[in-house]
Image (spheres, rainbow, N blue to C red):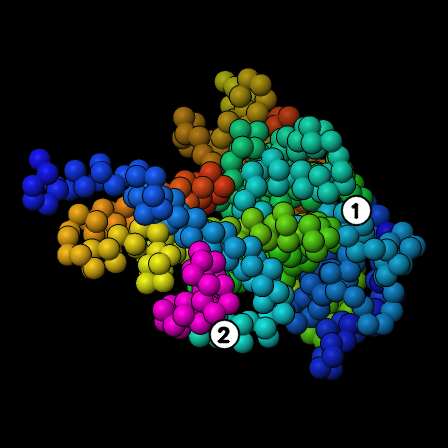
Amino acid sequence: MGSGPPTLWEWIARNWDTGRADSIRNLLLDHLVMSLTPVLFSLLAALPLGLACARWRRLYQPTSGLMNVIYALPSLPVFMLLISVTGLSQTTVIIPLTFYGMAVLIPAVVDGLASVPDHVRQAAVAMGFTPARRLLTVELPIAVPVVLSGLRVVAVSSISLVSVGALIGQGGLGGLFTRAYQNPFTPPVIVGIVLVVALALVADGVLVLAQRLLTPWVRARRPA
Amino acid sequence: MITFDEVTKRYPDGTVAVDRLSLEAPTGEITVLVGPSGCGKTTSLRMINRMIDASEGRILLDGVPVEGIDPPTLRRGIGYVIQQAGLFPHRKIVDNVATVPYLLGWDRRKARDRAMELLERVGLDPSLAGRYPFQLSGGQQQRVGVARALAADPPVLLMDEPFSAVDPIVRTSLQDELLRLQAELNKTIVFVTHDIDEAIKLGDRVAVLRVGGTLAQLADPKTLLSRPADDFVREFLGHDRGIRRLQFVPTSGLELRTDLAVAPGASGPDGEPWHLALTPEGRPAGWVPRDEPERLERYGTFVLGRDSLRSALDAALLSPSGCAVAVDGDGKVVGVATRDALDRALAEAADG
């Protein structure tokens, strides 16, 4: 032992928990924080904005246009721009990812509300729901399946995109890729890719499970 | 009672949907609004619970103008059934039915108990309570819609083409069910349809509206069929108006022959081509031709006094003998209406 490059398993064992910031374990935790925080924030921001766009339809075109422009911006220059404000911190990664998430979730909220059949909405009005109660107990629950499928896209893309943050030293598992670039050596790349993909799969699985639990009435629907 | 007092609905673009409509929907009766599309029937209905507000005139609910009542409060006191049922897809059947009780702040258990009671009342298996709307057929969904409208026991029920999206057989059974429920509940019902047959079947009073939202005629179905106010109403009623009118002619005045109904084992009267064989219980067994005493042929029955002359005529046309069998409420034979007897009754109906 000791002579020649370590094998994949030796490298993992040696780097899993070194107590340093760049141990695999800490990178994984950073990755989780930096990818899931934007998912949560983008959902919190997209709900009121989506509701506003659904309520005042004229807002929707400019809002979705603006969000698409933001979505089209390459992440690297955005990071560079933000460094002057938020520095080399996790926040610099979290902010653009939150906007990317909003670009997907605002249309999802609008489409979800549009998926409420007109006769259902009419019935709710005729039964004597107040507008607020109708929104909370009829329209939003019916919008959940569409919003959740948007959320799945956001979660997976967010987990994948965090890696780019490695270029400013905040990439979670993406740090493993830059390390391999500086010093050609394959185990970190393999570990990085496997963990990012595994994280994405787990996040997606959790959301699919949530969909099953939250919307049994969709599963109950007969195939069209 | 619901009163329309010179009600007009004019939209900002100048379209007039309802034009100075005045009519009354009496308490405990079914008032049907019928007319071609564009006659403002749905608009009129929706002005009652303020889903649409009238531009001019007033709508009174038992003398109180609806414009003074807060819409959600007003609507919780008025049952509403729409064409596609409008059930909430994300709620179980029992919770769909309990919607208005929940809105009124009933205790959850009490609301659900009430919902279960109503499911049975509208003829649904209580085991459907835990299902979601998509698991039910169109006819079942529509029954749930009716149960939901009745849940808080509102005195008034508005029904907007509730049975037009289901197939004809289901529609007939839903109509019969509504009449049965109404006989028990005596709600004040305003029913919108474009189907004149449905209007005549269900309505205590029928308001025929013409395009542009004006009232062409308001009458009970029998009067509507016998004395249409103008060519529009006559045309709207269709060609077989005469036949349909027979459903309002009673059978209590029919002359019946009792000698043609024969107890088991006995033989028929002489000189008659057919006689009716009875079962030991006195129910009809079948028509027997004189030449072949072993044969039993089809027969048609009507309940004397309850069914109309139209049913009696239908019963006669179903039998090879050409006679209709009159039965009592238990299905026991009380006599036979021959072609001659039906002929005389038809002649009287045509005069009257």
Residue A66 - label: 2
Q: Chain of mark 1?
A: B
Where residue A97 sits, quadrant-wise, is bottom left
Report whether mark 1 lies on the same chain as mark 2.
no
Q: Nearer the viewer, residue B246 or B161?
A: B161
**Amino acid carrying mark 1 in the image:** Gly
Return the residue at label 1.
B77
In the rendering, at what x and y percent does residue A48 appear? 60, 60
Classify A147 as above or below B13: above
Residue drawn at the location 30% of the way across and 37% of the way down: A17
Classify A80 as above or below B320: below
| Labels 1, 2: front one | 2
Q: Nearer the viewer, residue B40 or B110?
A: B110
Overall secondary structure of the magenta section:
helix
Residue drawn at the location 54% of the way across and 60% of the way down: A46
Q: Which residues are magenta?
A: A70-99
Indicate left or right for B196 with B190 as reference.
left
Residue drawn at the location 43% of the way across and 27% of the way down: B293
Indicate left or right for B268 with B236 as reference.
left
Indicate left or right for A101 with B324 as reference.
left
For label 1, the crowd category at 10 Å Cα-Cα, with few meaning under 14, some 14 to 19 and many 20 or more, is many
Q: Nearer the viewer, residue A181 or A107?
A: A181
User: How many marks on residues?
Assistant: 2
